[in-house]
Image (spheres, rainbow, N blue to C red):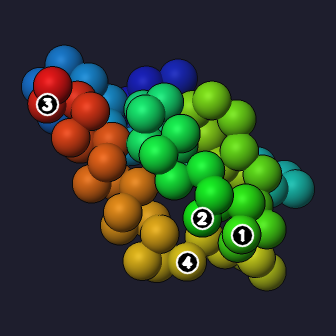
Amino acid sequence: MAYRMPGFQVGGSVVASYAAFSKQCGLYLLPGAIAEHAPEIAAAGLKATKTGITFSPRNPIPDDLVERLARSSLREAQN
């Protein structure tokens, strides 16, 4: 748990975390993962910040993109 959000920690880094709010959901990753996949995030019609992607249940993040984001975030944490 970090910032009251469940997540996945590897070593000392939280690789991915998530949260649900009243109007949106969020997936939070290390900044390099977001930057690396920015074109794909935009192409999926999603809004991103430096460390997070917001989405709704009606427009979720595609599963394959979640996997690529998590793997990128893990690589960043291991470097």
- Mark before the other along the chain sequence, 1 or 3: 1
Q: Which residue is mark 4?
A: 62
Which element type, helix, strand or loop, lies under badge 4? Answer: loop
Q: CA distance from mark 1 to mark 3?
A: 28 Å
Q: Earlier in the sequence, mark 2 or mark 4?
A: 2
Per the image, the residue denoted by label 3 is: 78
Up/down of 44 relative to 48, above or below: below
Q: Looking at numbered disc 2 in the image, what kind of residue is underneath it?
A: Glu
Residue 4 percent coordinates (x, y): 52, 29
Task: Give coordinates of residue 63: x percent, y percent.
Answer: 46, 78
| Residue, disc 2 | 40
Label 4 amino acid?
Pro
Kind of element beneath mark 2:
helix
| Residue at image location 71% in from the left, 45% down from the top | 48
Quadrant where the N terminus is found in the figure = top left
Q: Residues within 10 Å of mark 1 (few under 14, many from 20)?
A: few
Comparing labels 2 and 4, the label whose residue is closer to the camera: 2
